Amino acid sequence: MQQINYKTPEELQFLTEKSRQETASFIRKLKKKKPKNLDDVVHELHHEAFDSFSCLDCANCCKTIGPRLTNKDIDRLAKHLKLKPSVFLEQYVKTDEDGDFVFKERPCPFLLPDNYCMVYASRPKACREYPHTDRKRFLQILNLSHKNCETCPVVYEIFEELKKK
Ligand code: SF4
Ligand code: SF4
């Protein structure tokens, strides 16, 4: 896998758009074929990518998308900040168009200027799991991951590598 270089969300949106048809057709083929080793291949690419690329040089996800928050996330974050959950909700959280809890602001209110996360130890589950390239059954999240190519330079490169294989 080639060395990952940081790309802005604008650059990633442009590149993802440029290869949209090609990637969509590749995804259709994968869904049909259901390759048994897909998880292994994606996990290997994930580790290769993050061995040489640091999220601290990016933070695109924290700047532009923001996580969905569970009740457990809210309790944990409120405790971390020594706030009552109701105060935390009032100060930081809104309900989006799907009825999910999300942070009121983007970039995330806990993203520091050097791209560190102020609440890292207590960060939401969705932040821990993003960009999902080390999870099981990657086949089930191909469309979501195609969307994530517009945000995450690692996901974008993983798709480019997969298409070559
Ligand atoms: S909580 Fe931390 S990891 Fe999650 S979006 Fe905010 S800054 Fe990023
Ligand atoms: S998960 Fe992806 S988008 Fe988020 S900081 Fe890391 S490389 Fe960037």
Image: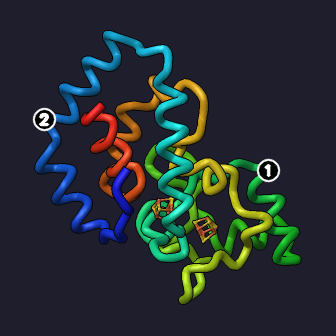
Which quarter shows the C terminus? top left
Most foreground residue, 125 or 164: 164
Label 2, secondary structure: give it. helix
Label 1, secondary structure: give it. helix
Q: Which label sits in the foreground, 1 or 2?
A: 2
Question: Disc number at residue 72?
Answer: 1
Which amino acid is tagged 2?
A: Gln
The quarter holding residue 10 reads: bottom left
Residue at point 32%, 42% (across, down): 161
Above or below, 109 relative to 29: below
Question: Percent position (x, y) of residue 89?
Answer: 70, 66
Left or right relative to 10: residue 79: right
Question: Are the residues flagged by discs 1 and 2 in contact, CB closer than 8 Å?
Answer: no
Above or below, 151 relative to 161: below
For label 2, the residue is 21
Distance of label 1 from label 2 (alpha carbons): 39 Å
Residue at point 48%, 76% (across, down): 57
Residue at point 84%, 72% (across, down): 80
Which amino acid is tagged 1?
A: Lys
Residue at point 78%, 64% (across, down): 122
In the rendered structure, which disc, 1 or 2, sits on the residue that comes first in sequence?
Answer: 2
Left or right relative to 100: residue 57: left
